[in-house]
Amino acid sequence: MKTLFIDSSRKKLSVALLMDNNIVGLSNIESYNKHSNFLMNEIKKIFDNSDIDIKNIDNIVVLNGPGSFTGIRVGVTIAKTLAWSLNKDIYVVSNLKALTIGYIDDIVISVIYDKSNYSYVGIYENDKEIEDYININSEIFNINNKKITICTIDNNDYVNTLKSKLLVNNNVTLKIIKDYDYVNLIKYALSKSKVNPHLVNPIYLKKIDAEKNDYKKVS
């Protein structure tokens, strides 16, 4: 089985080709705000170097965010277009889940920072997951007597405050994720249900002010 993986949600553009549980092509380049200039070329290079025709892939895995507006729509759009034009299955994973792949604890928390005291947070316990836009003071962090791993790509004030709050009653480990566990991430994606390409939608990093204000009213 051959799977094309695409992630354009970060400053780093990532493209991978998995064949029979082995990565046969991988590209990681820093092209922030210019992903559209490089993505198709990086995909072409991976297939040229692996001597595989893109028409012979079986499926596509794409990360749909949360991520930057400009970056993430590039990867999602190209993944949807390839899936539709080549008649291939497409699978979608959130960036929050992608950060946790390979880490096992009582609770695994992934954080993608926005600004101020708000961030996108994924909380994973016994296959139950919460993915939402959460204030640092949310009651959702009232967790006790657990082994917790926090996964993030950016060690910022939000993450450090969150770690300090959780450390009061828990054993907490912070992991700064430099890159994905591509093989297990793709295998995880393929274990889920495929998606209609037309229904694959990006999750953008920035929430509009009205949504933030509504959250503050109910929290």
Image (spheres, grey):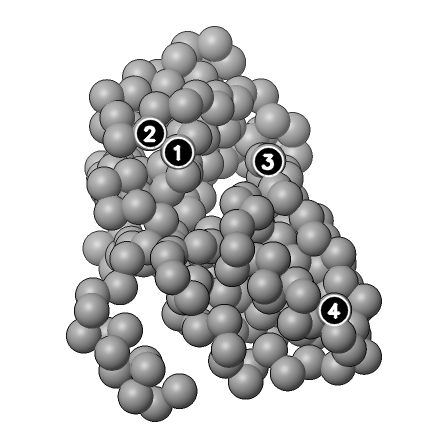
| Tag 2–tag 4 contact (CB < 8 Å) | no
Disc 3 is placed on an element classified as loop
State the mark number for residue 11.
Answer: 1
Residue to which mark 3 is pinned? 178
Q: Residue furthest bottom?
A: 218
Q: Amino acid at mark 2?
A: Tyr
Instruction: Give the residue type that dot 1 points to.
Output: Lys
- Residue 48 at x, y percent in the picture: 41, 10
Task: Please tell me how crowded label 3 is: few (under 14), some (14-19), or many (20+) other residues with Cα within 10 Å.
Answer: few
Q: Position of residue 76 (x, y in %)?
A: 29, 44
Label 1: which secondary element? loop
Q: Which residue is mark 2?
A: 32
Q: Residue at x 48, y 21 (%)?
A: 27
From the image, state whether disc 3 or disc 4 is nearer to you. Answer: 4
Residue 88 rendering spot, x and y as whole percentages: 35, 42
The residue pinned by badge 4 equals 167
Mark 1 and mark 2: span between their CA atoms?
4 Å
| Whole-number angstrom distance, CA of label 3 to CA of label 1 | 12 Å
- Residue at point 29%, 20% (across, down): 38
At x 60% / y 27%, what residue is drawn?
23
Which of marks 4 and 2 precedes in the sequence? 2
Please report contact status of discs 1 and 2: CB closer than 8 Å, yes or no: yes
Query: Residue 181 or 17: which is nearer the viewer?
Result: 181
Tell me the SS state at disc 4: helix
Residue 69 lies left or right of residue 107; in this view the side is left
Asked if 36 appears above or below 111 in the picture, the reply is above
Identified by mark 4, the residue type is Leu
Q: Residue at 64% of width from left, 83% of height from top?
A: 142
